[in-house]
Image (cartoon, grey):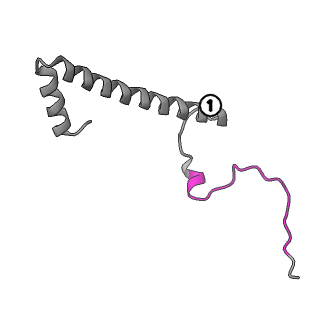
Amino acid sequence: MTLETSAAIMDEIFSSSQEEMRGRLLKIIQDFLVSEASKHNTNEKGVKGTGKADNKVNMAELVGNTDGFADSGCVILVRNC
């Protein structure tokens, strides 16, 4: 929908006198926006469910700094059988 060719087609449809075509285009845009809103709401629910305020990435954890992680104190022993 954001390509120049798509925008040109939409401009042509909106400037035409064909009401049926304008209605179809508006319906397509509405369906798209409803779909995007649904995705956004699902995303927001996922973020709220994790207890995080936003989707920011902790760069220190991303590169391997685990100092802020909880340590259970549990040590797993591996034995050769």
Vertical arrangement, residue 32 with respect to residue 59, above or below: above
The foreground one among 77 and 13 is: 13
- Residue furthest to the bottom in view is 81
Magenta segment = 60-78
The foreground one among 65 and 38 is: 38
Q: Is residue 64 magenta?
A: yes
What residue sits 12% from the left and 27% below the top?
Answer: 12
Vertical arrangement, residue 15 with respect to residue 57, above or below: above
Residue at disc 1, secondary structure: helix
**Badge 1 amino acid:** Lys
Q: Does the magenta stretch include residue 16?
A: no
Residue at label 1?
A: 48
Measured as percent of width and height from the top left, residue 33 is found at: 38, 27
Residue 16 lies in quadrant: top left
Left or right, 75 with respect to 41, comes to right
Name the quadrant of the N terminus.
top left
What residue sits 79% from the left and 53% below the top?
Answer: 71
Left or right, 15 with respect to 46, comes to left
The foreground one among 18 and 77 is: 18
Measured as percent of width and height from the top left, residue 56 is found at: 53, 40
What residue sits 61% from the left and 59% below the top?
Answer: 64
> Dominant secondary structure of the magenta stretch?
loop
What residue sits 82% from the left and 53% below the top?
Answer: 72
Q: Can residue 62 be seen in this view?
A: yes
Residue 34 lies in quadrant: top left
Left or right, 72 with respect to 62, comes to right
Vertical arrangement, residue 70 with respect to residue 25, above or below: below
Name the quadrant of the C terminus.
bottom right
Measured as percent of width and height from the top left, residue 48 is found at: 62, 31
Left or right, 30 with respect to 10, comes to right
Measured as percent of width and height from the top left, residue 3 is found at: 22, 40
Count residues near mark 1 (Cα–Cα under 10 Å), then give few for <14, some for 14-19, many for 20+. few
